[in-house]
Image (tube, helix red, strand yellow):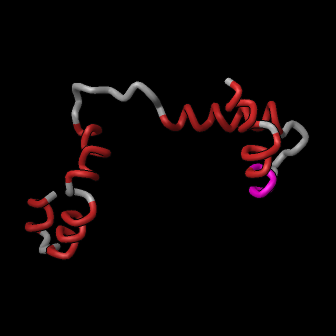
Amino acid sequence: MYDFCVQHDLEYVWAYMWVNWYKKEDWVLWARAANPEKVCLFKMTMLIETHWKVIKRDFLPKFFCPCLDLVTYVIAWKQMLPTFLRL
């Protein structure tokens, strides 16, 4: 990234990257993706799609496209969260 920024005279881009992405706290969050030896065990898209499928099938079966406030209410208060807290 540094070489790319130097070649294209992008000093402000490099400053942004250094401050926001390359500090140690943030580096450990995303730099693992660059290691070809390690494969993530979880596919986040698959987890989110499965979670949404459970919400739609088990808790909102009568709604084709529910409003966000209804979904939030069902997750937090109505049925879903109390169900998972009992597990």
Identify the image quadrant of residue 9: bottom left
Q: Residue at x 18, y 71 (%)?
A: 15
Measuring from the top left, give residue 47's x and y in whole percent.
56, 32
Residue 38 horizontal side relative to residue 49, left or right: left
Q: Quick one: which residue is furthest to the front in this view? A: 86
Secondary structure mostly seen in the magenta stretch: helix
Instruction: Name the quarter where the N terminus is drawn.
Output: bottom left
Looking at the rendered structure, the number of numbered marks drawn on it comes to 0
User: Furthest-right residue in view?
Assistant: 62
Instruction: Say if the magenta span includes residue 77.
Output: no
Q: Give above or below for 56 relative to 14.
A: above
Which residue shows up at 87% across the image and 45% down it? 63
Residue at 23 percent across and 64 percent down: it is: 17
Q: Kindly indicate the quadrant of the structure image that contains residue 69.
A: bottom right
Q: Position of residue 44 (x, y in %)?
A: 49, 36
Could you say which is closer to the camera, residue 65 or residue 84?
Answer: 84
> What is the magenta range?
67-71
The quadrant the C terminus occupies is top right
- Front-lying residue, 74 or 46: 74
* Residue located 24% across and 49% down the image: 27
**Residue 83 point in image, percent of width and height:** 74, 30
Q: Quadrant of residue 62?
A: top right
